[in-house]
Amino acid sequence: NFDGPNDRTTTYKNGKPAVVEADKDFNGKPDVRAQYNEDGSKRLEEQDTGGNGRYDTAIYFEDDIKVRVQEDTTGNGKKDVVTLFTDGVIQRKESDTGANGQFDRVARYDGGVETTKTEDKNGDGKPERVIHLAANGNKGREEIDTSGKGRPNLVRIYARGKLVREEE
């Protein structure tokens, strides 16, 4: 942007880019850092999305295709959201909503569309809540374990996102 400091720095290894750092917000500090394999394909991209000088998002690639994204959404230095991809299409997203190192929410996708959400707040490996989503993203069916026995004992059925039936 011609303000004096370099906005992009490329480090080469054997004549090919190995690391590229970019200052996208022009504050003089890099906020994107990409690392490349020897064949020139991108291996890792780190991003400082908060502008605080810390890389809080890491995007991993295989053969230049995104396979995993890890994010620190709370700023505590720990990745609390992990998103997995197959052939560049989202398949699963895990979240640690309590910032305690335990991933308690999982969203599953089919063809890039979210189909199921699960919550396991007590960390026993058995979800207390499973939400099945309709093609438009609205709730279709919700299964809840209110007893803590590891099995749903309350089922809610939705139509057009509105509760129409509840079964115990």
Image (spheres, rainbow, N blue to C red):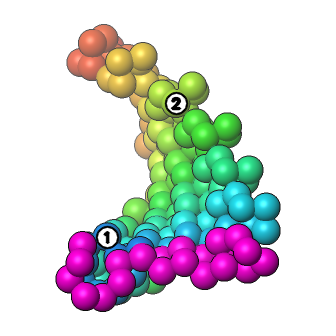
Asked whether residue 9 is drawn in magenta, I would say yes
| Residue 84 vertical position relative to residue 95 in the rendered view, above or below | above
Relative to 102, does residue 147 appear above or below in the rendering?
Answer: above
Q: Can the viewer see residue 119? A: yes
| Res 6 → quadrant | bottom left
Is 127 placed left or right of 114 in the picture? right
Type of the residue with mark 1: Lys
Q: Which structural element holds mark 1?
A: loop
- Number of callouts: 2
Please give the range of residues in magenta: 1-21
What residue appears at the point 79 percent right and 68 percent down from the top-left corner? 38
Q: Which quadrant is home to the N terminus? A: bottom left
> Callout 2: helix, strand or loop?
loop
Q: Is residue 58 above or below residue 10?
A: above
Which residue carries the number 1 mark? 24
Q: Position of residue 53 (x, y in %)?
A: 35, 86
